[in-house]
Image (spheres, grey):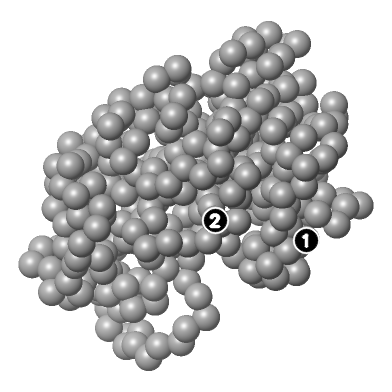
């Protein structure tokens, strides 16, 4: 069968292997036929050799963590043949740490977790894959062409879950949300904000292309100005760019008692800033800034429910390119106006 692989740590080792071995039985009882995988910045960083870890005893890592497939067999009876399914990416560490022991593996304390297509577990960019029933998330038939959006939606489902938990430290009646970055994560964060009945604003550099229209189609407001020029103070910020200047700006822009969730990862750029002013803002206004990454089973289920409620045509518009496996190199080459690119295993 076909599999898209890299040699971790070796830049530009991306290849499609035509005769990859069938998934081993010890990967799990549920056998799945791949429909598609979504491609994200993590994949590009692994291809560039920045990180990634092959399974023990192997040199190659199968890519793909934004999965969508159809069940071929499940002896456990959890799913039925033909069901749509996505695979949970992170698995708990074997020790386990206190969080992994209770199913909160997104909050792993010792870093010994594994992740499909990223760290020590083969990914889903192959014709067939297996997983354990507890890591299989069923999806309704209506999501057959967009279900690979589930994994990025879990990232923001977790972010919103934690925002709301923090918010209830006091009487909390948020009204205004600022999302910085209109990539897939930012747009899905905006979707979940709109679903909560909040006034959502999205800020991005793009002045044309699909991003402004997708934001407006949600009923949200689009901005392409510096954070400092916004004429409101958001109760909630979901920061999805990782750009250091934006990160610092939104910390200072949040309203009193505001909550800032950092969902983007910054690069190595160093900037000068007034740490004292930031400290005064956070302390005197009771603001909270926290980081969020990955998701556990609860968030996967919340994300599946959010996609089920979303406008299907809007979700479809997030996918700007669908590329057959035969043209895999094109799928992993960024193009102008890309939002979500999908590698299609059915074409």
Count residues near mark 2 (Cα–Cα under 10 Å), then give few for <14, some for 14-19, many for 20+: some
- Residue 126 visible at all: yes
Q: Tag 1's secondary structure? A: loop
First in sequence, mark 2 or 1: give its number: 1
> What residue do we see at 31% from left, 49% from top?
187
The quadrant in which the N terminus is found is top right
Q: Which mark is residue 330?
A: 2
Residue sitting at x 63%, y 30%: 34
Q: Give the alpha-carbon distance from disc 2 to disc 1, as whole Å.
A: 19 Å
- Which residue is at a point 78% across and 61% down the rendered structure image? 7
Q: Say left or right for 29 vs 290.
A: right
Whether 163 is drawn above or below 194: the answer is below
Name the residue at 35% across, 71% down. Answer: 247
Q: Which residue is mark 1?
A: 7
Q: Say whether residue 299 is left or right of residue 317.
A: right
Q: Is residue 139 above or below residue 322?
A: above
Asked if residue 32 is positioned above or below residue 245 in the image, the reply reads above
Residue 208: x and y, percent?
20, 62
Q: Is residue 79 above or below residue 310?
A: above
* Number of the front mark, 2 or 1: 2
Percent from the top left, x then y, of residue 325? 61, 43
One can see residue 285 in this view: no
Locate residue 285: give its quadrant: bottom left
Front residue of 73/240: it is 73
Position in image of residue 170 (x %, y %): 26, 47
Q: Check disc 1: other Cα within 10 Å, few if <14, some if 14-19, many if 20+.
A: many
Q: Provide residue 126's location: percent of width, then percent of height.
A: 70, 38
């Amino acid at each position: 069968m076909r599999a898209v692989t890299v040699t971790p740590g070796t830049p530009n080792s991306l290849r499609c292997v035509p005769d990859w071995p069938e998934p081993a039985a010890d990967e799990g009882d549920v056998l799945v036929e791949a429909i598609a995988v979504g491609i994200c910045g993590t994949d590009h960083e692994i291809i560039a050799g920045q990180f990634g870890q092959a399974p023990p005893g192997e040199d190659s890592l199968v890519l793909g963590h934004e999965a969508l497939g159809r069940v071929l067999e499940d002896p456990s009876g959890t799913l039925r043949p033909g069901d749509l399914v996505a695979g949970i990416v992170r698995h708990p560490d074997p020790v386990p740490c206190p969080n992994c022991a209770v199913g909160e593996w997104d909050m792993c304390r010792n870093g010994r977790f594994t992740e499909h297509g990223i760290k020590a577990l083969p990914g889903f960019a192959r014709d067939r894959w297996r997983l354990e029933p507890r890591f299989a998330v069923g999806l309704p038939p209506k999501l057959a062409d967009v279900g690979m959006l589930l994994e990025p939606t879990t990232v923001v489902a977790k972010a919103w879950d934690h925002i709301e938990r923090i918010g209830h430290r006091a009487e909390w009646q948020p009204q205004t949300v600022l999302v910085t970055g209109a990539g897939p994560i930012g747009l899905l964060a905006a979707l979940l904000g709109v679903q909560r009945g909040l006034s959502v604003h999205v800020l991005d550099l793009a002045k044309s292309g699909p991003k402004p229209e997708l934001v407006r189609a949600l009923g949200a407001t689009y901005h392409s100005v510096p954070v400092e020029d916004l004429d409101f103070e958001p109760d909630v910020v979901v920061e999805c760019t990782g750009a250091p200047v934006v990160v610092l700006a939104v910390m200072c822009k949040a309203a009193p008692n505001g909550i800032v969730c950092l969902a983007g990862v910054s690069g190595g750029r160093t900037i000068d800033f007034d740490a004292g002013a930031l400290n005064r803002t956070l302390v005197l206004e009771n603001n909270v800034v926290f980081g969020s990454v990955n998701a556990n089973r609860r968030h996967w289920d919340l994300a599946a429910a959010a996609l089920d409620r979303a406008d299907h045509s809007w979700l479809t518009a997030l996918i700007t390119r669908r590329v057959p496996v035969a043209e895999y190199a094109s799928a992993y080459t960024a193009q102008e106006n890309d939002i979500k690119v999908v590698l299609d295993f059915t074409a």
